[in-house]
Amino acid sequence: MRPVVPLLLASILLVTSASTCAQARDEATRIPDAAMDTAAQLREAALASDVGYRVVESLTTEIGPRPGGSEADARAVAWAEAKFHELGFDRVWKEEVTFTRWVRRSERAEVLGEFAQPLVLTALGGSPGGTVEGEVVRFADLESLQAAPAGSLAGKIAYVDHVMARARDGSGYGPASRIRSRGPSAAIRAGAIGYLMRSAGTDSHRNPHTGGTRFEEGLEPIPSAALSVPDAEQLTRLLVLGKPINVRLALDCGWDGMATSHNVIGEITGSERPDEVVLIGGHLDSWDLGTGAIDDAAGIGITMAAGKLIGDLPRAPARSIRVVAFANEEHGLSGGRGYAVAHADEIALHQIAAESDFGAGRIYAYASSCAPQAAQADARIAEALAPLGIEHMPGDGGPGADISVIAANGVAWASLRQDGTDYFDLHHTADDTLDKVDPEALAQNVAAYAVFAYLAAEAEGTWGSAPKAASAP
Amino acid sequence: MRPVVPLLLASILLVTSASTCAQARDEATRIPDAAMDTAAQLREAALASDVGYRVVESLTTEIGPRPGGSEADARAVAWAEAKFHELGFDRVWKEEVTFTRWVRRSERAEVLGEFAQPLVLTALGGSPGGTVEGEVVRFADLESLQAAPAGSLAGKIAYVDHVMARARDGSGYGPASRIRSRGPSAAIRAGAIGYLMRSAGTDSHRNPHTGGTRFEEGLEPIPSAALSVPDAEQLTRLLVLGKPINVRLALDCGWDGMATSHNVIGEITGSERPDEVVLIGGHLDSWDLGTGAIDDAAGIGITMAAGKLIGDLPRAPARSIRVVAFANEEHGLSGGRGYAVAHADEIALHQIAAESDFGAGRIYAYASSCAPQAAQADARIAEALAPLGIEHMPGDGGPGADISVIAANGVAWASLRQDGTDYFDLHHTADDTLDKVDPEALAQNVAAYAVFAYLAAEAEGTWGSAPKAASAP
């Protein structure tokens, strides 16, 4: 099973484009004043609590890297169940998902000949193993590679040298990740035997950024990898010398059979409408290179802590708070897809969903899919988030990756946008470790998720979730 | 042949302690006004020139990593000869040195058992290869390890977890590098089968810092390595959980027979006293992990460029300017020691020497060994350096590592101290690459070395070099 990212991106865009808030109607969803008072107390309690950080510390330290389907991933599932219990959730369960596992064993590259030297790179997720040697042909962007005539790269290694832009909203990642997902297939069509790209990242360290790629049907996959940014710059300087540069690329990695993992779920039972659910979550798996602190132990810590703090209230909110630790997000969104299948008949019961999967930076904006009748409640949530430095940006953002599947099926979503200025310095690298998480910024995230989830669960009226014509799960 | 660092450090301290400037006497060494005018022009020309940066770029790009005695080291020697010729030096030659080569092939470590996960580390230079498994015993500092009773670490892996302090003058490196050089022997005496240390570094990246260690005579060497800072923090957090933590450490590295390399020397012939020499230089070799941009392509670029700019003057200075690219500094100071032996009878002809081997940060202080009669000339050099933001700090600093050998034998020295605040973020890591070099700061260094070398070569009178009782070369 390969990642179906383009399909899902299309779904996300579809949802996003329908997300501008209309005026509230008479039957408007509303949030009582008493709930606003409780939300304010919850906000302050969250800012003063380190429970979110402790969850991140525990997961990254005790489990470490936990790629989907690995032995460590199984330990992470047990860890999540235990942690939900420890945090006092009312119900804890897991839901099985299966997928094809991809594994990295070793990777190595070197410039050959007159300028012989090693290059630091990492295989793209989904790449086959193999050793290839060939002359490097540089392309400044994906379009240039896509324009290369068939056969023009026969026996050669294609190299795309795009410099990713740094941005608070992470908007540089779209073009950079397309080079990762589409570049290898374009290279194959031109005859290339190997594929290299400058990492989709904004740092200057010898820590290359991995990430999933895919090969179009009918093409024979080739070894595909990302150079660290300094290594990409080095390769480009070598090419500027004007002589042919030959590189040997040796990857030992590949798909490794079917694996099983689990979405792990903890719930605070609603006091009035327990069957109706406000869903928050992150993904439990990580890439193998780092300990997945910002991607996505942070999301797990933020949402587990938000649920725990709501559970600590004297009275549970009207609806249930469901925290989902999704399985195997990195290799095909297995958890998000599995959840959507398992809960396909419960669209309307999922009142609204929000996922934290963009690191551990402060949240600066709030928006939601905002059904017309929910505009007033949406504005009240924004009002309760404002003291956290969060701006209301209706129409902005979209659902996180895992919840994009249920969102495409009709579940309303909220977006709590994190500052991603530095996120791509670390994303998908060995450098994604606990020391990069700022406890204060994390607590601000916990406060925001707690406020959002509590108020969404207390709102009288609905958030507009309703089944759509079935979308691909 | 093992590094003899402690012996050499003793020599450096001996020289340093005698370095306070006395009052100038009647027979004072002096610098003519015309030379000061030329030095000012040289300074401005250097600030406007990128020749130093281009040398660093060329060495790090075309050769890359160049550990002493490697194939790349041989290419670096040829590169240096060609570069001296290209830059217009009057005389270019090389002097052979031989030493024992140490090589790194692979390295890997992992926590075993309940918290299984990989750890990122790098072997210390001089470590033997081997695979060991054992429980980790943490020590907060070297003294605690040295106090461990014999046999108390039998079958275990010693781990020293010292946090290196960041400082402009690099003063945190002394304690940290002692843990590297002395820790393994202390661990062996207590019975340990392996040695781990938190990197001697100030960064937070998964890029461990290598560096030479040594084993005392009569002890059987054990695999010894440095964890990256995040990995050390991770290991410490695991130990705090209170359960035994077992680690497997697998190093494939070791001494690899005798090798030959060369000091490569370029000279601008003096116009009046060509046999008298002002020596500047850096070291040509690097560690294997990075491309040795700040350690020490920067020193090579700074001093080659300074010599080239002096060579471009309409009239050469009175004395010769000798630029030395020393061989194999990292594994035993082979070049500095070889140079001292080869030129043992020329102490007095070496008027004064200065080495650049502390990165590419701006120079903030100038000092010299300052023989009494040279105080006036010393002050004039300081005056010419002041517009570069360089302060005169008589009595401060010491000779660089390679020239410490000739300094111990009686050659006068100067110290142009670089800002080392960030140096140990990169030092001896894979991250020591060209992108870390600031071209403007490098040009400031070139200007300072050009001004110093030119004025030292123009000074009338001597700098006080005179043979001492022979010190160990």
Image (cartoon, coloured by chain):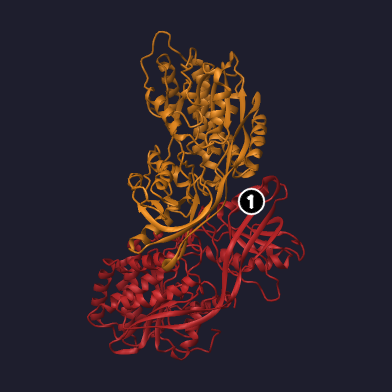
Chain colours: A orange, B red
Q: Is residue B197 left or right of residue B29?
A: right
Which residue is tagged 1? B236
Q: Is residue A86 above or below residue B283?
A: above
Tell me residue B472's x, y (percent).
56, 84
Tell me residue A377's x, y (percent).
44, 17
Which residue corresponds to the image point at 39% horizontal and 10% vertical from the top-left? Answer: A25
Q: Is residue A314 left or right of residue A29?
A: right
Q: Is residue A397 left or right of residue B38?
A: right
Which residue corresponds to the image point at 41% horizontal and 24% vertical from the top-left? Answer: A15
Give the chain of mark 1: B
Outermost residue toward the bottom?
B345
User: Which of B139/B430 is in front?
Assistant: B430
Residue A422 can be seen, yes or no: no
Mark 1 residue type: Thr
Q: Is residue A52 above or below residue B128?
A: above
Which residue corresponds to the image point at 44% horizontal and 41% vertical from the top-left? Answer: A181
Q: Is residue A449 above or below residue B393?
A: above
What is the quadrant of the N terminus of chain B in the image? bottom right
What is the quadrant of the C terminus of chain B in the image? bottom right
